[in-house]
Image (spheres, rainbow, N blue to C red):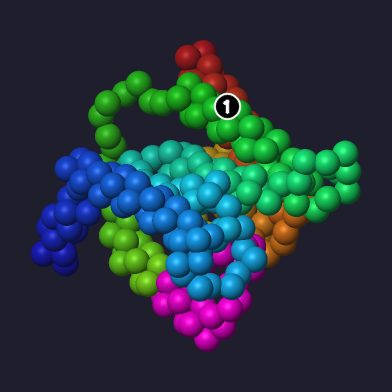
Amino acid sequence: MNSIRKIIPIIYQKFFSETTRAKAENVILITALISFFIHLLIIYLIKLEVINYQSNSELLTNPISAAYTPFSFILIYEVYLLIYYLPRSFTTYITKQYEIITLIIIRKLFNDLSAIELSSNWFEIKGDLQFTYDIIASVLLFYLIYLFQKQWKNRIPKKTQIQPDIKRFVHRKQIIAIILVPLFFLIAIYTLINWSYGIYSSPNQLPSFESINNLFFDQFFTVLILVDVVLLLISFFYTDQFHKIMRNSGFVISTILIRMSFSSSGLISTILIVSAVIFGLTILTIHNRFEKQNEAEELN
């Protein structure tokens, strides 16, 4: 048991040290840049009929949609950052979930832009309506995340001394983070193989854009729900304060709402995502008011 406790910090440092994070960032950014030019090259080779591939997908016909690919790699880095911050701060970990779903919508906007139709019947065209939903949602989510981070930063503890029970909680979160790295890697590999097989079996028909946009992330948020529930249950060992239990429970519900958005489309999907972030922000705001009240009572 003691040997396992000694190994955990070593493995954790291998995956989540500042050096590893910096290397991962450089690799992802370089890969994103290269992938952008490759995607752009493929689009023009198809246009010039150098590559004979019959497809009506905007991802292979419009140069604007080439930005979709590098954003996918940036999202991979955001997934790594989410796991990176998990042992450090539960609230930062939740913030990263909100940032990831916002970036998914931003990535989707590039496809919306490539399919947009400028006409007087704007609100009668499905693609134009979806673009309207997504662009409003992205701005709203950006502001909600700002408010969420502001609420969190206002409650950062001033004490630097870490209590023993908090150290144990952090240790358990480090174990979860270590498990998540290979798990998400396996999910990503499985998703890629499954998607590639789908293209190979139907070479003249790409999967729908909705399925491509949800690729990996529907399974990703399913796993996050399970992780959030585990963290919630573990937190019961370290606190019995009602407002903290409500905060952690609220964050689980927020993640579930985000996951539900992948099972729907159009306006319903957008409403679920925005509602998830609003719910999380509301829960955190009420939690902080409880904290302030408790501090005032202690002083009196």
Q: Is the magenta stretch mostly helix, strand or loop?
A: helix
Task: Look at the image and tell me whether residue 28 can be seen.
Answer: no
Task: Look at the image and tell me whether residue 112 can be seen.
Answer: yes
Amino acid residing under circle 1: Leu
Instruction: Check if residue 37 falls in the magenta segment.
Output: no
Q: Is residue 88 shown left or right of residue 265?
A: left
Q: Is residue 15 shown left or right of residue 227?
A: left
Q: In which quarter of the image is the N terminus?
A: bottom left
Q: Is residue 291 above or below residue 196?
A: above
Q: What stretch is highlighted in magenta?
A: 190-219
Q: Is residue 256 shown left or right of residue 195?
A: right
Q: Residue furthest bottom?
A: 201
Q: How many labels does the image show?
A: 1
Residue 133, image x and y in percent? 74, 43
**Residue at 51% across / 41% down in the picture?**
99
Residue 229, image x and y in percent? 51, 59
Residue 141, image x and y in percent? 62, 36
Q: Mark 1 points at which residue?
A: 147
**Residue at 50% across / 29% down in the picture?**
149
Residue 2, image x and y in percent? 13, 62
Residue placed most toward the observer, 104 or 275: 104
**Residue at 58% across / 32% down in the picture?**
142
Residue placed most toward the observer, 275 or 24: 24
Q: Is residue 204 shown left or right of residue 41?
A: right
Q: SS at mark 1?
A: helix
